[in-house]
Amino acid sequence: MKSVIRIEMGAQLLWEASKTESGNWIAVNDAVGLTMQSDSLDELHSMIEEATQLLFEDLFEDGELDAFLRSKGWNKISMPSDSDGGIRFDVPYELLVKHASDPSRPVH
């Protein structure tokens, strides 16, 4: 059984979401260059968590995580040299929902 190494990130990602005319939700995070689309806010939260995890796993596996963090002005984190696929990144985020009548409000 593989052990999981949890890595807490010293950054909080801000996602801006809005509902399309067709009823779908779109969320954008410029800091990491990701855009998500879903049918509901609950699904959007799940997709954000999964996409963020995959992004940081890929950066770690490609040896690009430290450079990426520095380019964003985030603190370098101490990382294991080999994870054997068992790393879990804890990246806090906030989802701001934009409405035509209300420019933005946080959703937790």
Image: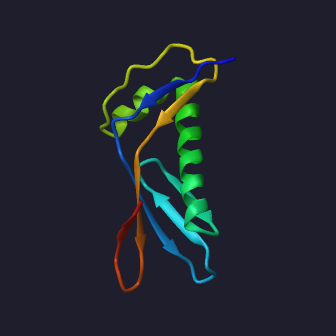
Q: Residue at x 41, y 26 (%)?
A: 66
Residue 18, given in percent of the width and then of the height, sits at 48, 73
Q: Residue furthest right?
A: 1
67 or 51, which lies in front? 51
Place of residue 97 in the rendered image (x, y in percent of width and height, measured from the top left): 42, 70
Q: Nearer the viewer, residue 77 or 32?
A: 77
Q: What residue occupies the far front of the structure in this picture? A: 1
Q: Quadrant of residue 79?
A: top left
Picture coordinates of residue 74, whole percent (x, y): 32, 36
Quarter holding the C terminus is bottom left
Residue 35's image quarter? bottom right
Location of the N terminus by quadrant is top right
State how the image is colored: rainbow
**Residue 87, placed above or below residue 97:** above
- Which image quarter: residue 62? top right
Residue located 40% across and 45% down the image: 92
Tell me how many marks there are: 0
Residue occupying the far bottom of the picture = 101
Residue found 58% across the figure and 53% down from its top: 46
Say left or right for 19 vs 95: right
- In percent of the image, x 60 and y 68: which residue is there? 40
